[in-house]
Amino acid sequence: MNLTSNNTYFEDFEVGMRIKHARGTTIDEVENQMLTKLVMNTASGHWNEHVMKDTPFGSRLVFGFITASMVIGLATQDTAENAVKELGLDKIRFKKPVFHGDTVYAYTEVLSMESTPERDAGIIAFKHWGVNQKDDVVFEGERRVLLKKRPAER
Amino acid sequence: MLSNPDFSTFKPWRRGNRYEDFELGQVFDHHWGRTLTAGDATLFASVALRYCPLYLNAEYAKSEGHDDLVVDPLLVLATAIGLSVEDLSEIGGPFLGVNEVEFEAPFYPGDTLTCTSEVVDMRESDSRPDTGIVTWRTTGIKQDGQVVVRYSRTNLVAKKGRRS
């Protein structure tokens, strides 16, 4: 049984390729409150609406790594469905605050590709952007994935 | 009927550090630790849309040579950051950046994460005199001492006297 698609292997990418991922997602209170507390981020900027009402933000903020995880999540089917493993991230930046109810879309560019001898896989470096409903970039960052090469039977 | 106590006389229990509390080379062993269960891992990977079967299908992960589901490395990273917030960034200061994140070993359901951080750079902010800029190098390890994640994080940190 093939559980992953046949167009997300190492060979399906090329350097300079640019992808707008298929789906966007609204980040609601339920995602941010549950996941931020699941990972025990204690900052009141994410927890306390009463305190945040009196700040220039005016409301609680989505924890940056929830935004990052969901933007990378929107890109995960296309860029890691056939991953051997995810290797790392770099140059993670949060360019604008994200609030409950904002919607994000994910964009990706292939920065580099490197064949490796092990496990019939190669390393791809991706640059990801998360863009909100007002076309503002809210997140950007790089990510390296060890991605399988297409097996002979597919 | 008993009247309520005067809550304004209760002493606030403060949490978090300010710029002046940090010094170069200072090391923090962050509180609590966190065992990440299969429930945590599949909840996070599902809600964060991390639809890679290594993180959500145990049988697929086993067919790839793992003993169990692989815990989403973004959950391991977010938990490491979460555990470090009270010591490093609870008081007033957004992220300026996170760099050089390396996932060094797989994390499996039932593994326990603990984290330490070292202050590797600090300076005053030119544009915002009530804040400083601090960079920490954080290491997350599991119960057998194996390093699972390393990264650098830079934040604006409030100085003393600023409200938040």
Image: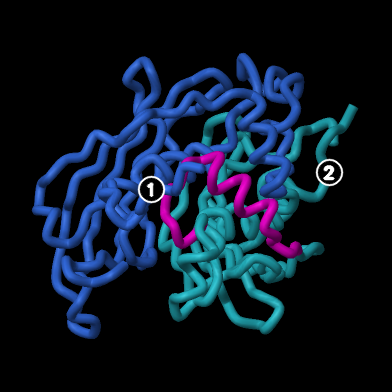
Q: Position of residue B93 (x, y in %)?
A: 33, 66
Q: Answer with the quarter of the image where residue B155 lies.
A: bottom left
State the residue at coordinates (34%, 44%).
B84
Q: Is any part of residue A35 visible from this angle?
A: yes
Chain B: give its colour. Answer: blue
Q: Chain of mark 2?
A: A
Foreground pick, B14 / B4: B4
Disc 2 element: loop
Q: Is residue B73 magenta?
A: no
Q: Which residues are magenta?
A: A25-46
Q: Position of residue B27 (x, y in %)?
A: 16, 40
Determine which of the numbered discs, if any, sits on residue B137 in the image: none
What separation in Å lies between label 1 and label 2 (alpha carbons)? 64 Å
Disc 1 element: loop
Q: Is residue A61 left or right of residue A130?
A: left
Tag 1–tag 2 contact (CB < 8 Å): no
Looking at the image, the residue that sits furthest to the right is A1
Quadrant the C terminus of chain A occupies: top right
Which residue does the numbered mark 2 point to in the structure image? A5
Q: Is residue A32 magenta?
A: yes
Amino acid at circle 2: Ser
Chain A: give its colour. Answer: cyan
Mark 2 closeness class: few <14, some 14–19, many ≥20 residues within 10 Å: few
Coloring scheme used = by chain
Which residue does the numbered mark 1 point to in the structure image? B5
State the residue at coordinates (43%, 44%).
B82
Q: Is residue B127 left or right of residue A36?
A: left
